[in-house]
Structure formats: structure tokens, C-alpha cells
Image (cartoon, grey):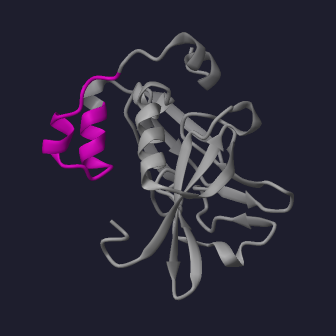
Amino acid sequence: LLETLGFHSNRALGKMGGNDVPAPNHATLFVNVDETQYLVDTSFLFDSPVNWDAVNAEGVSSHPASKFRIDRSGSQTMLFWQPLHFPEPIPCELVSYTVTSDEFDKLHEKSFSTSLFNFALYSRKNSKDSVVGTCFGSQVTLDSAGRLHRIPIAEADQKRFLVEKMGYSEEIIAQLPPDDPVPPPIKIKLGLN
């Protein structure tokens, strides 16, 4: 989309979960505007594009609840992102800054069977002072103090929440398949048991 709009961009890869992850499992995007490089990541849902050239050793989001941190102080570049499904920020090591579209497509296709986001609906939205969303059968709020508030939600209530609070159309929500059962090892890791 950004390239269609005339922006020069390049794909990059990361290992979400840090050193325990053997291969890249996260894709992100850099966009160049007037010779300045910006990190644009739709999964992390930054409150604005991150000026990559201006990020010092510890860059921090300006949004009170959608916090992330970028650590470029060592030989690795690490992003730390606060998801809605886990109480602590998750590390993501950037491992490649230039990825061909063919390589990107192959890795994306491979993720269909390995990503924890394939089991259940995961949607998040930044509001003025919090992040709201739904994931793994719960309605979740991440407040400005960094606390996660998780409430189990029935499928019908989840669909109503997606329309009324998240702004999705009823036509799109009507097409959602039911969540798949989350495998036990992933449930334990996410604290969903």
C-alpha cells in the first residue's frame, strides 16, 4: 500500500521472542520520506511512525499505554513490545533490514502453521490513554500504568465489541470463523490455562 502511494519502503525481519527463536517470525517495514527512515509496524501499532534515524539507545513510545522500547545500544537491535496476551513486553531482535518480496512471501506462508496469532482473533486499538482489544477469548484493556485487565468474553459479545468499540463493520465481523482451540503448550506460555 505504501509503495502504491509513492513511498520507498523495504521489508525487514525479526525474531519475536528473542534468542529462543531459531528463525525469523516477525516482519516489519521501513519507509523513507525525504531521506529520513521511519519504522512502520502494523503489529506493534505505534501511535506514529518511528523516526529510525533519531532513535537513540533507548527509544520509547509517546503513547501512555502502547509502550514499546528500542534498544540499539549493543550489537543487536532489540524492540520490546507490550502485547495484549502477555503481561511482560516481548523482545524482537531485528535480524535483516532488506528482504526480497519472494523471501517475505515464503516466510509469511510458513507462518500460517506456526504463528500463535493463527488460533484466535487478535485485534487491538490505541485510544487516548489505553489500548483496548480482544484476544484468545478475552476482552483486554492495557492501561497507562501498564496493567492488563482481561475479561473472558462470549463469541456473540466479542462480535458486538468489535463493531461497537473497535469500529469494524458488521459485514466483516459476520465473516469471522470461530477461534480454534489454543494448543496446551501455547496456553501455558500465554498464561491462559
User: Residue, x 61% and y 61% (percent of image)?
Assistant: 64
Q: Give the range drawn in magenta.
A: 158-179
> How far across and how far down the image is residue 148, in percent?
59, 39
Pick whichever, 45 or 105, lies toward us.
105
Judge whether residue 127 can be spotted in this image: yes
Judge whether residue 124 can be spotted in this image: no
| Residue sitting farthest toward the bottom | 34
Question: On the picture, is 74 further left or further right than 93?
Answer: right
> How far across and how far down the image is residue 176, in percent?
23, 32
Does residue 27 show up magenta in the picture? Answer: no
| Quarter location, residue 39 | bottom right
Residue 15, compared with residue 180, is above or below; it is below
Pick whichever, 186 or 98, lies toward us.
98
User: Residue, x 46% and y 48% (percent of image)?
Assistant: 104
Question: On the picture, is 51 further left or further right than 177?
Answer: right
| Quarter location, residue 1 | bottom left
Residue 43, compared with residue 175, is above or below; it is below
Quadrant in which the C terminus is drawn: top right
Residue 131, compared with residue 184, is above or below; it is below
User: Residue, x 57% and y 42% (percent of image)?
Assistant: 83
Residue 193, compared with residue 45, is above or below; it is above
Does residue 159 show up magenta in the picture? Answer: yes
| Residue sitting farthest toward the left | 171
